[in-house]
Amino acid sequence: MIKIAKVSKWYGSFQVLKDCTTEIAKGDVVVICGPSGSGKSTLIKTINALEPFQSGEIWIGDTAVHDPRTDLPKLRSHVGMVFQNFELFPHLSVTENLTLAQVKVLGRSSEDARERGLKYLHRVGMTAHQNKYPGQLSGGQQQRVAIARALCMDPVVMLFDEPTSALDPEMVGEVLEVMSTLAAEGMTMLCVTHEMGFARRVSNRVIFMDQGAIIEDCKTDEFFRDAGERSPRARDFLAKIMSH
Amino acid sequence: MLRTILVVTLFSLAPPESYGQSSRPSTLEKIKETETITLGVRDSSGALSFTTGYGQYDGYQVEICRRIASDIKSRLGLSNLKVKYIAVSSQNRISLVQNGTIDLECGSTTNTLARQRDVAFANSVFIEEVRMAVRRGSGISSIGDLGGKTIVSTTGSQPVQILRARARGVDIEFKTIYGKDHADSFLLLETGRADAFVMDASILAGNIANSRNPGLFEIVGEPLSLEPIAIMLRRDDPEFKSVVNKSIESLIAQGELPRLWNKWFLRPIPPNGRIMGLQLSEATKQAWETPSDKPAEQYRNFSIESATTHQGGMDFGIFCRGITTGRIMDDCLGSRADHGDTTYLRWLLSAWRWTLVVAGIGFVVALMIGLPVGALRTVVTAKWLAGSLTLFTELFRNVPILVQVFIWYFVVPNFISLFKSVPAYLVVSLGLGLFTAARISEQMRAGILAIPRGQFQAAKALGLSTAQCYRYVLMPVALRIIIPPLTSEAMNIIKNSAVAFAVSVPELTMFAMQAQEETARGLEVYAAVTMIYILSALSVNRLLNFVEIQTRIPGTNNHSNDASAAKAARP
Amino acid sequence: MSLDLSFYSWQLVTDYLAKGFIFSLKLTSCATLFGIFFGVFLALARISKFKSLSRSAATYINTMRAVPLVMLILWFYLLVPLFIGRPIGAELSAYLTFSLFEAAFFAEIIRSGIQALPRGQTMAGLALGMTYRQTVRYVILPQAFRHTTPILLTQVIVLFQDTSLVYAIGAYDWLKGFEIAGKNYGRPIEAYLLAALSYFVVCFALSRLVLILKNRLGMNGASA
């Protein structure tokens, strides 16, 4: 469903992505991990064209992300994204956050949008807060609303950029739980995260990146079980992570 | 802020020394001690007194003063006498004589009873006729033709009050605007904003002679009044006055005056060799034969009482005096009963209204232009467009507001004649608005840039187009962020509206200067005007604070984890 | 209507403009120096714990900021001689007015610079055993100045533009020079155009310098 072919990106003379190539099939739950600065967030943001790239191709279904003629807003409306800093719109209530894009981008009526919003709000367990403002919610609550906001657009794939990194430890669980349920329901997901427990339990593929290149790209159990056969850098990384 | 008002009130209620009555050394003593005589001169008063550049002054009156100075030098037996020149204006010349900054005022001041309460006058050697300058072919030849027209005169000068009195006499309605100095007033006539310039004939002649095309103008109309122009000096110093008059007597005796008249009024004069072309009038010839310091009232057959009073200390009752009659009126707010005479209080209130109108329109213009431009500057990538928007902003930020107003008022109508018919206050509002728009666009830009990039990305990730992102996500937050700087700008524009006075919009500052000159009650007038400015600024501040509270995003006061909400809460 | 370009001559500069420009410069420098000096004390007074001190400072600052500069100029010119019993020239009056006026604005800028610093800085200074005064002198003020230098400099440019307001009392500044020249030669239009251009060139150049300085200090684009 998503094809990433030889994608490279430079910031000035510094190359942040080196010839990244992979394919995501429908229903895949892929975790992207690696040390900081490895380009994970950058890679995930090239998929919905939030980050431009200089060479390579990215296809979502039949749409070419790299093609300058592509209608990007339209493309993005079918790709859901959840950010590290939640990025809810502070001046809008929870409900308004959920309905804004539905009405303005997908052209749904306000009633339909509201209904759908409440439905997803229920799924993430935040119905009671529908009229509150983001400033009045905790981090975990905000992130769950952010997930609902993305889901309201009925995306074909959900991209997560370190969704729990900005959360206090006791709130990480509630967000991961929502994500697990989503995966179990068959949503295609791409997740940049440090939560290896989550990776092991929920994902079916792991991509390991280091210094802008994809080093490992294999099934989850292969990655964790046959650790010995993995590349030195991956082993190194695993050793550091697993000691927590 | 209430404290501020209290302080200013208390401050201005403190009784000052009464005008010009302290026990000071006599002028001659001061001159002898400092070996300096200070002459007050004008920068551009026809051929009576003007500057030829680089601190040099000359003219009929100035030369006479120099002669007086040299007589004083011999009389006091000084080996050295430095002559110092200080430029004065219609607005401050009397104060400067009163407080001793200048010893002799050698400009174009009319000797009047009212002024004689503040200063003394030497014998007059120049009798001025107040007449009108008009554009040739305008069909105006006397005061009777002025119905419905616009007259210009210079703030703080005598002809203004004469005109008012005359107009009352013949029941003519016309509009009066004020130039801040004579050349300004003439410019208003030249550019068509006024139909007639009423002023002393010598000043009219001088400005016409100096203009680009003198043949376009003519001096018409019966002399509205005869004005004895005389050198001003300190009031309570009879010794000095007699010395000065003796000096003038000897000039007359030596037959110098007709020679001086020819030199300054009938032959080419600096800086560019123009000729005034003013003939010696009967009245002036008579004054040379029998010199006196008769005030103008004795030359006239009508009276204008001035509103000047001389009670010691503060007299806020000044505001209830009529501006033409000087009498205290029953209705302090000035009803229209008495032939349209009105009180200073009513004038003050009208001036306040003008200030608010100019500032208000200006602010609206500023918002309508500044906000979009500021937002655009954060989004355009095309170099030429970004460059021109930046240029626009830089242009209006880097030229003083006063200069900008002059450009819109005088220069632009020259090239775009459409502007000539735009009323003065709109022109000023436009200039003010553009000046403020540039600053607002900077603040809008900063406000948007203060929002974390993540917000923009989140909005884009949902599929919103760039325009939608701005409209629904960025602008609402940015606008709230910039309410404090916008409040500042709103208060600033009220203050900056004061420059409207320079192009004869009758707002508060112009009122302050004109009323101060007319009533000689500077403290009261300034205090009232200052109070009103402070009040206006305070009200705007409160109003916008209220707006800020009403539009505050709920939840921005708590300690929240949301990074962008926290940023939005910070002013 | 076309322009009379013969008006623009070098003689124009020497006869009318140089004198005014020099005065504007002197006025700006004097008001800046005094304004910053006095402004620091005002700012510190404003944030001091002693209510009377902070309230007086606030009153002073708010008064200066609420009243149009033109009015202040008129006030000082009228009042000072009456209170001290001696005459005062327009130029001296202008120096006084502008210095006191700018002090209020600089005080606000410095104050916001000080308050933008994390409280931890003051605490760290005190924890090391420094007195409050030392902490202010060696820790707080240097940082506050570094952060606010671009804003202070921008205020100086505004001040330079504001000097044109001394026309109200007849002082001979740069704008007055243009005006007088224009009027005495009968070419006001050409004079005003030149005035606008001249001010633009000077102020624009200065604001570009401030931008370069901002970049050097590494603060461009960063929110506070």
Image: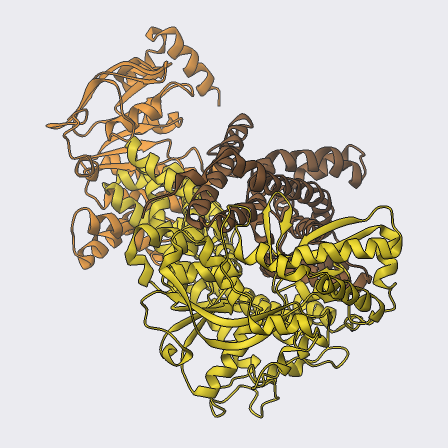
The correct choice, above or below, for C40 with respect to B181 in the image is above
Question: In the picture shown, does residue B470 fall above or below A223?
Answer: below
Is residue B29 among the parts visible in the rendering?
A: yes
**Residue B64 at x, y = what percent?**
69, 58
Q: Horizontal and vertical percent for residue C208? A: 49, 32
Residue A9 in which image quadrant: top left
Chain identifier, orange in the render: A
Camera-side residue: A203 or B237? B237
Q: Which chain is brown?
A: C
User: In the rendered view, does A3 fall on the left or right side of A230?
Assistant: left
In this rendering, the answer to whether A83 lies above or below C165 is: above
The residue positioned 58% from the left and 40% from the top of the image is C15
Q: Quadrant of the N terminus of chain B?
A: bottom right
Residue at image point 68% right, 72% down: B289
Residue found 57% across the figure and 85% down from its top:
B322
How many numbered circles does the render carry?
Answer: 0
- Residue C48 is situated, as x and y percent measured from the top left of the image, at 73, 51
Residue B474 as seen in the image, left or right of residue B166: left
| Any part of residue B541 in sight | no
Viewer-proximal residue among A93 and B326? B326
Q: Colour of chain B?
A: yellow
Q: Position of residue A24 (x, y in %)?
A: 20, 23
